[in-house]
Amino acid sequence: MSHPPVVTRFAPSPTGYLHIGGARTALFNWLYARGRGGKFLLRIEDTDRARSTPEATAAIFDAMEWLGLDYDGEPVSQAARAERHVEVAEEMLAAGTAYKCFSTQEEIEAFREAARAEGRSTLFQSPWRDADPATHPDAPYVVRVKAPRDGDTVIEDKVQGKVTIRNDQLDDMICLRSDGTPTYMLAVVVDDFDMGVTHVIRGDDHLNNAARQMLVYRAMGWDLPVFAHIPLIHGPDGKKLSKRHGAAGVEEYRALGYPAPAMRNYLARLGWSHGDDEVFTDEQAIAWFDLDGIGKGAARLDFKKLDHVSAQHIAMMEDETLLSQVQEFLDATSQPMLTDAQMDGLRAALPFVRTGAKTLPHLIEKARFILASRPLDVEEKAAKALDDVSRGILSELTPQLQTASWKREDLETILNTAADAHGMKFGKLAAPLRAALAGRAASPSVFDMMLVLGRDETIARLEEASQ
């Protein structure tokens, strides 16, 4: 029997930024659909009009685009579908699987107080559930779905396993409020059904919602999707991830200069694993990703691991991809873009500046020597290496470098000979050379910098530093 094509969805509420946990949920849905030739859809759950601003929605689109999570078709607005949600509530009323409840807030509170006093369950049981419509007053009402009163509701969850909820724990969920607007719990189910969603992959904070949402599927006679509730992400201290742990929104990681491919890799490994593989490409993640590989325990955010994954991606990225990542980073953080000449310099320096660079700013800092122009801005620590003796040695080097072949072996010979002549180890001479060539105490190898800068620029910088 052939299965219907896989359809997954990501359904964020626009709250001003895309949370890192939401980004991982989106990634898991994207990987699952892409690995099975299915569809990945985006729905903005914008029914909370106060919080759902165009700016907040744009922030989600931006973050998705940066992460490279392309979705199929147009994004769906939940708020725009309110009429359809109401229509389903009316179908349930007509079928007798839902009912009009005229109980007031005061009556519900009185019911709960009496239940508390008698030690009974405080789940509200409406007196209108089986009332004759002829007895209905001309008053505001909510529409409630009829929940089963006995037995169990079983969620066959692909991550959590078999989850059983006693039906006497489920209330008759409200589907339409007294002002006629649909509730989130109804809207989600109708949207998922209408969008043809086959797999609902979301945070396990929605696990209890699943049992209640199943009431609507059953009332309408709709097939249930496959549920997979993934554990939330915790901070390094094991507590639920929040702003106090540092970067909570995707755009903050972008601003810190983690390349998008590294971010995808790192997020995929947060709570999902494929053997011992830590660093992998998108193609590998798409081929390997399955719901079986998701752990039941909460994943912990670990910046050291993120740095490691990021460094590996910077090391293995194609040159042109890495260069475009640098320009995109500068653009996103409102920094001046690199000129063509700077791009050429960075391209030439890439083989050694990318080694060990953990982030794009780290890479740019290592390449500072080729991106900067004279006069160099020399940091205080480096300036200390340019004492009178050191400046004298730099002056002596200039005429020898004028005639050098500009091959590494030749440059090594000249500089080592100069160090010997002054009775010092090469490491001692390297400090003023770094200060002169890069304006930094820590920089790439002196020889690497000289080869990339070329003879004229190297000599110009040495002359400037020896003044």
Image (spheres, rainbow, N blue to C red):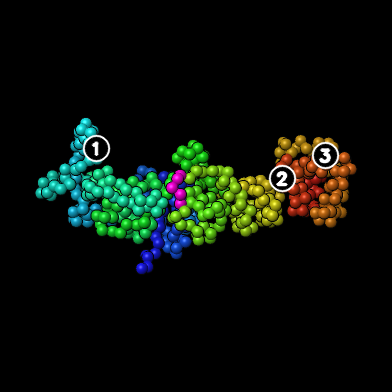
Task: Please tell me whether residue 297 belongs to the stretch shown in magenta.
Answer: yes
Residue at the extreme left of the image, as rendered: 134
Picture coordinates of residue 82 (x, y %)?
A: 29, 53
Picture coordinates of residue 346 (x, y %)?
A: 68, 53
Looking at the image, residue 219 lies above or below residue 111: below
Mark 2: give few (<14), some (14-19) or many (20+) Cα within 10 Å. many
> From the viewer's perspective, is the residue at label 2 or at label 1 nearer?
1
Q: Earlier in the sequence, mark 2 or mark 1?
A: 1
Kind of residue indicated by mark 3: Ser
Mark 2 and mark 3 in contact? Answer it, CB < 8 Å. Answer: no
> From the viewer's perspective, is the residue at label 1 or at label 3 nearer?
1
Q: Which residues are magenta?
A: 294-298
As drawn, the label of residue 316 is: none
The mark tally for this picture is 3
Q: Residue sitting at 51 percent across and 55 percent down?
A: 274
Task: Please tell me whether residue 3 belongs to the stretch shown in magenta.
Answer: no
Q: Residue sitting at 27 percent across and 51 percent down?
A: 215
Looking at the magenta stretch, what is its main secondary structure? loop
Kind of residue indicated by mark 1: Thr
> From the viewer's perspective, is the residue at label 2 or at label 3 nearer?
2
Mark 1 and mark 3 in contact? Answer it, CB < 8 Å. Answer: no
Kind of residue indicated by mark 2: Ser
Tell me the residue that label 2 is attached to: 443
Q: Residue sitting at 35 percent across and 53 percent down?
A: 156
| Image side of residue 87 versus residue 351, left or right | left
Picture coordinates of residue 244 (x, y %)?
A: 49, 37
As drawn, the label of residue 390 is: 3
Whether residue 301 is visible to the viewer of this picture, yes or no, is: yes
Tell me the residue that label 1 is attached to: 122
Whether residue 61 is visible to the viewer of this picture, yes or no, is: no
Q: CA distance from mark 2 to mark 1?
A: 68 Å
Looking at the image, residue 148 lies above or below residue 281: above
